[in-house]
């Protein structure tokens, strides 16, 4: 019985660590996405001015070729920061540049 309990604890601990690692990765946006967000926001600001809004879809092509990255952006936008569908590009750019 002790062996079974030990194995169950190890599996639970392993799953918790995996969840923790996934959470850390989502909260800490990967560098390639961070660069893309800053680039797109900067371009929109230059083209349309300070009042331009963006959604997290603005950072992706109109196809779902990287669903994991899309979910990472959506999680950062919706769950982590509870942002509205459209936010000012300058606000998003500042958030990403500051490491939020």
Image: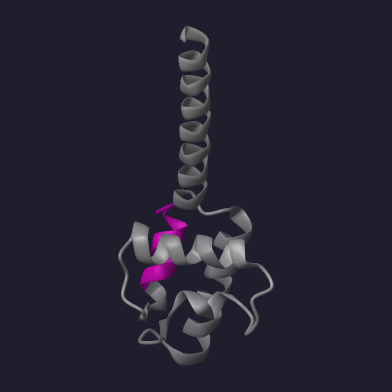
Q: Residue at x 61, y 67 (%)?
A: 67
Query: Looking at this view, is 64 or 36 the one in front?
Result: 64
Answer above or below: position of 91 versus 54.
Answer: above
Q: Residue at x 33, y 61 (%)?
A: 81
Query: Disc count in the image?
Result: 0
Q: What is the chief secondary structure element of the magenta stretch?
A: helix
Going by the picture, which residue comes out furthest to the bottom?
Answer: 48
Residue closest to the eye, 29 or 98: 29
Say if 12 sits above or below 42 in the image: above
Q: How is the image coloured?
A: one colour
In percent of width and height, residue 68 lies at: 60, 61
What residue do we see at 36% from left, 81% from top?
Answer: 86
Residue farthest along the top direction in this orientation:
2
Q: Please tell me which residue lies in front, 24 or 2.
A: 2
Residue at 46%, 58% in the rendered image: 97
For the record, the magenta segment spans 91-100
Q: Is residue 2 magenta?
A: no
Q: Is residue 63 above or below residue 1?
A: below
Q: Is residue 81 left or right of residue 16?
A: left
The C terminus sits in image quarter: bottom left
| Residue 73 in picture, x, y percent from top left | 50, 64
């Amino acid at each position: 019985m002790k062996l079974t309990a030990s194995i169950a604890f190890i599996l639970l601990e392993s799953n918790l660590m995996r969840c923790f690692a996934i959470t850390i990765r989502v909260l800490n946006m990967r560098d390639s996405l961070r660069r893309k967000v800053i680039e797109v926001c900067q371009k929109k600001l230059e083209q349309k001015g300070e009042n331009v809004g963006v959604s997290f879809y603005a950072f992706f092509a109109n196809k779902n070729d990287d669903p994991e990255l899309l979910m990472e952006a959506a999680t950062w936008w919706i769950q982590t920061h509870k942002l509205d569908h459209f936010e000012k590009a300058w606000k998003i750019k500042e958030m990403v540049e500051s490491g939020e």
